[in-house]
Structures are given as structure tokens and as C-alpha cells.
């Protein structure tokens, strides 16, 4: 069952990352996307005060499962883990973190702008 949970968490994690990157594009998904953006922001920055900047509770849970599967030397970042696993290379963790943060900030700005724009349209009506 632990392996099944690992596979489920991998699919969930990758799906959430892809949705985080692209969910703002479609009007129908913008509200749930913005909620995801807020959850990730809280995890990275508020929980990050206690567990370290960029803390992801989903990665934390996932790494506990991977530890049960006897995986060792797990990086802090799930994104680095997946890049390494998919390509067979060892990506620089700092570089991955900077790219991830840059994408996060861009998505946060876009999603917040669209959320405010939508609220302003509703007020005008």
C-alpha cells in the first residue's frame, strides 16, 4: 500500500504543479486556481517561518512515504526530485529553487491581477 500511496502522491503533486502553472489561463478554473495559489503561499511563507522558506506540506508528507520505501538522499524540492528522475541528471538545487520561485511570483501576480479584475467587474455591475 505504501507504493500505491507514493504513486498517488506523485500524480497528485505533478497535477497540482501543472494546474498551478496553467490554471489561471481558463476562466472556469481561475477561482479554484487562486485558492491553490493562496494555499501554496501560506505553506511557503507562513509555515516556512517554522519549517524553512518554501516549505511544502505535500512534499513533507510525500518524503515520509518515500522514507518508508527506503529512498535516501531526497532533495528538499519535489521539483528537483522530478527533474533529476525524468532526465537522469543532477540539477543544481539553488538553480531549481530560483526558477521555481520566479515562476511562482509570475503566477501569483497574474492570478492576483485576474482575481482583482474579476472582483472589479462584479462591482461595476
Image (spheres, grey):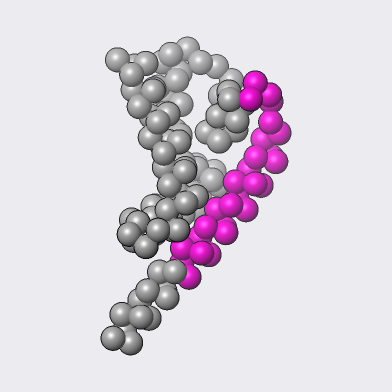
Residue 91 forms part of the magenta stretch:
yes
Foreground pick, 25 / 82: 25
Q: Residue furthest top?
A: 70
**Looking at the image, which is closer to me, 108 or 27?**
27
* Residue visible at 39% across and 22% down in the picture: 6
| Residue at 45% from the left image edge and 36% from the top image edge | 14
Quadrant for residue 11, please give it: top left
- Give the main secondary structure, helix, strand or loop, of the magenta stretch: helix
Residue 15 rendering spot, x and y as whole percentages: 41, 39
Q: Residue at x 60, y 30 (%)?
A: 83
Q: Quadrant of residue 118?
A: bottom left
Quadrant in which the C terminus appears? bottom left
Spot the residue most to the bottom.
124
The x, y position of residue 56, in whole percent, is 46, 41
Whether residue 46 is visible here, answered yes or no, is: no
The magenta stretch is 87-113
Residue 9: horizontal and vertical position, in percent?
Answer: 38, 29
Placement of the N terminus among the 4 image quadrants? top left
In the rendered image of this protein, does residue 47 appear above or below residue 112?
above
* Residue 19 % position (x, y): 43, 47
Q: How many marks?
A: 0
Going by the image, does 80 lie left or right of 32? right
**Near-viewer residue (43 or 16):** 16
Q: Is residue 11 above or below residue 109?
A: above
Q: Is residue 57 above or below residue 23?
A: above
Residue 116: image quadrant is bottom left
86 sits to left or right of 119: right
Quick check: 38 left or right of 107?
left
Amino acid at each position: 500500500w505504501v507504493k500505491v500511496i507514493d504513486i498517488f502522491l506523485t500524480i497528485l503533486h505533478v497535477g497540482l504543479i501543472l494546474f498551478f502553472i496553467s490554471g489561471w489561463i481558463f476562466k472556469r478554473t481561475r477561482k479554484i486556481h487562486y485558492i491553490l495559489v493562496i494555499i501554496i503561499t501560506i505553506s511557503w511563507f507562513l509555515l516556512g517561518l517554522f519549517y524553512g522558506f518554501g516549505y511544502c506540506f505535500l512534499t513533507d508528507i510525500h518524503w515520509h512515504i518515500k522514507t518508508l520505501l527506503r529512498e535516501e538522499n531526497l532533495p528538499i524540492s519535489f521539483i528537483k526530485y522530478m527533474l533529476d528522475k525524468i532526465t537522469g541528471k543532477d540539477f543544481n538545487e539553488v538553480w531549481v529553487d530560483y526558477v521555481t520561485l520566479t515562476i511562482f511570483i509570475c503566477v501569483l501576480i497574474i492570478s492576483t491581477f485576474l482575481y482583482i479584475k474579476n472582483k472589479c467587474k462584479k462591482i461595476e455591475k
